[in-house]
Amino acid sequence: MNKDKRLENWLRGKIDGVPDLLQPAAHALLQTKEEASIYLEDFPSHLLWEKPAGRASVGFHLQHITGVTNRLITYAKGHQLDDEQLNYLKREGIPDHDLSLSVLLENLNNSIDEAIEYLKVLQNEDLTRKVEIGRKKIESTLIGVLFHAAEHSQRHIGQMLVTISVVKAG
């Protein structure tokens, strides 16, 4: 794998242990992790919960990427959400001034690391397995859930970048 940080993750080569068909999902998740750290370097903590024009705060985006990644991997494993995950979901976006930016980033990084480790235990033949999502048990496929986790994280990174720009501009 090419470790050149000037290249986006998808251009750095294969991620050891991740099946070929899941490389794009792993690359997107790792890109999310990296961009969150880059975009939030020197970010003023007093702006963490600001909601410009009523839009989601930076704190929400960090919590949401963490939570969604965790929830989707839970579904991918064939489980339903537990009480702790449901409570986390209810708290996403509620300003918590006891949560520092470093803790939010650490939580995001841990969630993505756990997702990457899960990808490593999968085989290509697992990817078409049916997966049930949510209390309604809506059917998807394992590969669908994993790619959604990846693209969803990137979508929120993009939204967060805009929020960062707006709240820093004042």
Image: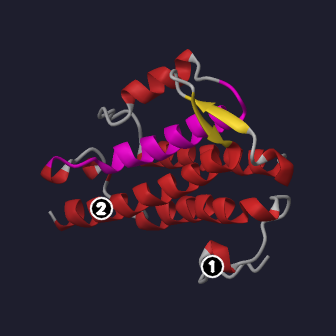
Predominant secondary structure, magenta span: helix
With 44 as the anchor, is 155 left or right in this view?
right
What amino acid is at disc 1?
Lys
Q: Secondary structure at mark 2?
A: helix
Mark closer to the chain start, 2 or 1: 1
The answer to whether marks 2 and 1 mark residues whose Cβ atoms lie closer than 8 Å is: no
Q: How many marks?
A: 2
Q: Nearer the viewer, residue 170 or 155?
A: 155
Measure the alpha-carbon separation of dots 2 and 1: 22 Å
Residue 115, visible in the rendered structure? yes
Write down the residue under mark 2: 164
Q: Position of residue 55 (x, y in %)?
A: 22, 49
Let me know if residue 14 is in the magenta part: no
Q: State the residue at coordinates (29%, 64%).
A: 162
Q: Nearer the viewer, residue 138 or 71?
A: 138
Q: Residues within 10 Å of mark 1 (few under 14, many from 20)?
A: few
Q: State the residue at coordinates (13%, 52%).
A: 53
With 95 as the anchor, is 54 left or right in this view?
left
Q: Which residues are magenta?
A: 54-79
Q: State the residue at coordinates (21%, 59%).
A: 167
Let me know if residue 75 is in the magenta part: yes
Q: Which mark is residue 5?
A: 1
Q: Position of residue 131 (x, y in %)?
A: 67, 35
